[in-house]
Every structure is written in C-alpha cells, then in structure tokens.
Amino acid sequence: MDELEIRRYKLFEKMDENSIALIYAGTSKIKSEDEFYPFCANTNFYYLTNIEQENSVLLLIKGIGETKTYLFVDEYSELKEKWTGKRLTFEQAKSISKIDNCMSTNNFETILDMCLNPSVKQYGDIKNVYIDLTEEIKVYPRNSTKEVKLGLERTYPHLNFKDIKPILCELRMVKSDYEIECIKKAIELTNRGLYDLVAYMKADQYEYQLADRFEMYGRSLSRDGLAFQTIAASGENATILHYPTQDERVKQGDLVLFDLGYRYKNYCADISRTYPVDGVFTPIQKKIYQAVLNCNKAVIEYIHEGLTLKDLQNFASEFLKNECVRLGLMNADEDIRKYYYHSVSHHLGIDTHDTSIREKPLQTNNVITVEPGLYFKQYGIGVRIEDDVVIRGGKAEVLSLNVKKEIDEIEKMFKSKGKMNE
C-alpha cells in the first residue's frame, strides 16, 4: 500500500464499525477587513491526504467489513483562479491523495446526509460520527468544527459524536520510515543554513538580518520554507525564550542564540545552536555553554523506550542544577527554574510542536527534540542546544548528528568562514 493508504488503513482500524469520520482542511482566517492570513491546512487532514487546498473535506466510512473513502474539493472556477490562483482538478486531487472517490464540495452535504439520515441508510446503519475538533479549525470563515458538530447533533440526534483527534494523535506520534527520512532531509538543509549563517554573521548586524539571511538561504534550497519563525537573539535577549522583535544590533562579544529549522515535504527540523559572534567563547560563556552541552548529551544518553517526556524533564532539571552548583553558577538552595524555565523535549513532525500525548511512554519511531538551556540575565547570556532524535532499538538515535555543537567545532567553523560555502 501507498504511505497515505497505510495511514488511512490504520485510522480505519481504530474506528468503531458503523462509523464515519469527518476531517476538514479548514479555510483561510480573516486578518482584517479585506485580507486573509495565508492558508495553512489542518495538519491532520494533510497527514491523511497530502492535500493543502482550503475548503476540502475527507469523509471516511466504516461499515461492517467494508470501508469507503471520499475526498471533496472545490470545483474549478475560472473567475476564482483569476483572483486567487489555481485550484486542483479532480484528477490532480486523486493523484496526490490516492483517493479515487474525489468529488465536488457541492456534493458533500448530500453524501453526508445519505450517510447519517436513518431513513436512507445508503452506507449502512451509521451510529458514530468522528470529527476532528482541533482548536481553531475553521470550516467557514467564522464557524469552527465544534460548531459544525453542534449543528450535526441537532440534525441527527440519534448519533454518537466523538473527537477523532486523540486517535490521529497516537498515529502521528509513531513516524514511518518515509516521515523520518523527510525530517532528516529537513535537518540536513537546516545544517547548510547554519553554515551559511556562520559565514555571514558579524558584530553590529541587526538580529533580524541574521533571521532574514537564514530564511532567504532556505529559499535558495527549496520552496518548502521555514518550519517556524526564526529566533535570532543576542546577549540578554537570548534569555527570552520566544524573543519576537529581533531589532537590536549584535554587539562584539555577544553570544547569539538561534532557534530555527527548514521544512522538507512539510516535515520540520527544529534545531537550536548558540554561537559567539566573534568566533571565540569567553570563559563565562564557555562555562555556561559546556554545562548545557553536558546536559544535552546526558539526556540523549538517558533516553530509552518507556520513559515519558516528564521523566526527561525531571532528569534534565536535576542535571542542570548539579552542573550549575558544581560550577558556582547558583547556590544549592536556589530553584533551577530561575535559570531553566522550559521543557526539554517535544514531539516533532508535520508540526514543529507535533501533536502528542505527553504522558504516553516513548516508543519506537517517536521523533522528539532534546533542548536544555540556561539563561543568566545578569551575565547577558542565554544558551540553548537542541537536537532532534528518533527512538530506535529502545534508545535515542540522533538525527542531527552532523550539526556541530562542541565548543572546539564551533570555533573552528568561525576560523574557516571563507571556505564554508566553497
């Protein structure tokens, strides 16, 4: 079976018999009076179809011993194409999604009623309706899937309605070999972008120039774009986790914290590296950086199947505290959360913070980040070192192994700036 067909097959396996599932692509969100935000398809819908076109709907029907799959997309409109660009033909949608039953969204309500109306029973005696209730999925400009569910409950009160998101979440947490290869490719591209950044960066540049450089370099590699908005934070700004403004100049002697990544076929890399703009760490920078690096490597070594993300967080917090006390960076009676105030790990995939059940023990083919950090505002230093790993053979395999992070490796990168992009 094709990758998409396998995903849908696994979803059907988890659905009750005599059920349907509705997964909406969503629609563009209103930004202002006459403008919409760029459309981003519901990633659950994309996961099952590879379709990124708004207003599309996936309908899965599971009877007794039989399944049917329908994809609904907007019909071609010459007028709409002139205003908003090309839309998929039915044949194109079939080819991308590997779904033969591709129809116009104009037919969706009719087919849905044929499924749910007890007097019709065109598709058997449907008893359950699964619907993706992910927050903020807009089916119409102002209606969410939760409001769609309420409307269906009023029309078909005999049915049992369930949220399909938890099922899709469990499926998406376990990556296929194809998905892992896509993430590895995204990391490889990101690594090339980091080499370019090191070759480009110098004191007195604005932080936004560094972020823009990474984005533009990525566009020269592919049209997949950024996994998320790049963070480039220098000096004290690096103690702000999601530093948004990037409007200060990088000063001589600063560390610059980068949190960044490219996409590949809509799969994300998520890498953090912290570099000295002058190419050499000062003694205090080196001390803090090495403490974070030691933690990064210790967490990776500690990871094994059966642990939870909370277990990793507890381990990282304790490790960092011991390091900081040992190095004289904090007192034994201080709370490490004063200097380390975020989680050490999250799942990674189509979304940078991929859908997950954080309490669920790690299992084979989970892809997660490892990102300890220390933030000392009094020194004007924030350090985060983030790698992406996959659980294989019961332990962590580092997917971002080629992204340099040792102090001597980083300083060598700066010394050989001129040769990096030859």
Image (tube, grey):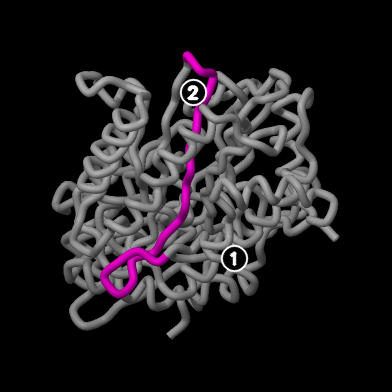
Q: Amino acid at mark 2?
A: Thr
- Quarter that holds the C terminus: bottom right
Residue 409, image x and y in percent? 61, 52
Tell me: 132 left or right of 206.
left
Tell me: 24 left or right of 333.
right
Query: Crowding at label 2, few (<14), some or many (≥20) Cα neighbours within 10 Å?
Result: many
| Residue named by callout 2 | 239
Task: Please tell me whether residue 180 belongs to the stretch shown in magenta.
Answer: no
Range shown magenta: 378-397
**Relative to residue 79, is residue 332 depicted above or below?**
above
Q: Tell me the residue at 26%/47% (across/down).
A: 312
Q: Tell me the residue at 79%/41% (across/down).
A: 200
- Quarter that holds the N terminus: bottom left
Whether residue 122 is visible, yes or no, is no
Q: Amino acid at mark 1?
A: Lys
Residue reaching furthest to the top: 378
Residue reaching furthest to the bottom: 1
Front residue of 274 and 260: 274
Residue 160, image x and y in percent? 15, 52
| Residue named by callout 1 | 185
Tell me: 132 left or right of 194.
left
Front residue of 355 and 59: 355
Classify mark 1: helix, strand or loop. helix
Task: Please tell me whether residue 382 belongs to the stretch shown in magenta.
Answer: yes
Residue 261, image x and y in percent? 59, 48
Whether residue 186 is visible, yes or no, is yes
